[in-house]
Image: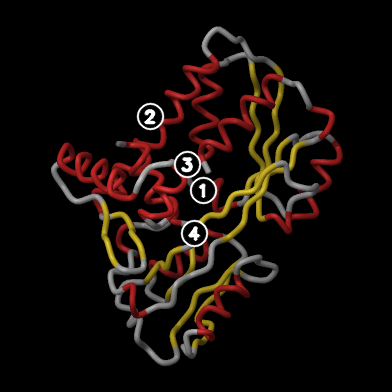
Amino acid sequence: MLRSFVTAVRSGSISRAATALGHTQPALSQQLRRLESVVGRPLLHRSPSGVSPTRAGEELLPYAERILSLCAQALTETGRALTGHCGVGLLEDLAAAQLPQALADLARLHPGATLEVLNVSNAAMREAYDAGRVQLVLDAVPDIPAPPRWTVRRPLVWAVGHGVDVTADPLPVVLFSNPCFWRTSVLESLEGAGRRWRVAFESNSLVGVLAAVRAGLGVAAVMPANLEPVMACHDADALPVLPDVELGLARHPRTEGDPLIDAVETALRRMV
C-alpha cells in the first residue's frame, strides 16, 4: 500500500503509477483506498489531470519513503559491512527532499562508510567528478558530467503562493534563474495554453524560489517532494499541465564493482 501511494504521488497519476508497478489501474486504486481507510483520512486529491497529495498525504509521504527505503536496504545489505567513501552530486531539488535521508539511513547501516553530498554549480560538479571526489551525479540529463547509466522522468507540479489568483492575466510566475533546464519548458507550457505571464521573482536557489512563493509573489514549478501543503493548487484546471523533467545518473568509470558505490546507486535509483 505504501509503495502504491508513493509511486502515485511521484508520478502524479494513478495510471502512470500502475504502469510503473506492473498493476492494473483498478488494483492500484484499491490499494490506495485501503491505505486511506487505514489512515482514516483522504491522502490524494484526484482530478482529470492527475493526483496530488492532501495535507495528510504530505505528512505521510516522508515516512512512507523512509520505510520503503529502509526495508529494501535491510533486505539487500544486511550482513555486508560496507566501507570507504562515496561522494554524491545532487540536483538541489533532490538534495532538499528525501534523498539525503535515504543516504543517512544507509550510513547508519554501515558506520564504516563515509558519504558526502554536494550541491554545487555544473562547472564545480564536473571538476569534482573528474577529480574523483564525486563518484555519482544525479541531476538533469543535460547537466550531468558523463553519459547517463540510466534516466527517469519525474513530474513537476505548480506551487501557488498564498492569495495568488491563478486566473490572473498576466500570471505572476516565480522562476529559477538561467541556466535552469526546466525554465524554458515551463514557460512554453504557459504560452502553449494561451496564458500570458510575467516574471514576479527569480532566484538561482530552491530556497529563494520557495520563499518567494510563501510570500505570495506568484506561482512556481517544483518537484512534488518540495511542494509544501499550503502551496498546493486545488484549482488544477486553471493552470496548464507541466512537462516532466528527465533526470539521469552518471557514475565514474573507475568505481565499477565497488560495493559501496553499488549500494548508494541502488538507494538513489529506488528513491527516484
The answer, for residue 225, to whether it is visible in the render is no
Q: Which labelled disc corresponds to residue 98? A: 3
- Which amino acid lies under the numbered mark 2 shown in the image of this protein? Ile
Find disc 4 in the rendering and name its residue: 155
Q: CA distance from mark 3 to mark 1?
A: 7 Å
Is label 4 in a helix, a strand or a loop?
A: loop
Q: Which labelled disc corresponds to residue 96? A: 1
- Confirm or deny contact between disc 1 and disc 4 (CB under 8 A): no
Badge 4, how many Cα within 10 Å: few under 14, some, many 20+?
some
**Mark 4 against mark 3, which lies toward the viewer?**
4
- Which amino acid lies under the numbered mark 1 shown in the image of this protein? Ala
Badge 2, how many Cα within 10 Å: few under 14, some, many 20+?
some
Is label 2 in a helix, a strand or a loop?
A: helix
Quarter of image, res 28: top left
Quarter of image, res 66: top left
- Residue 268 as seen in the image, left or right of residue 10: right
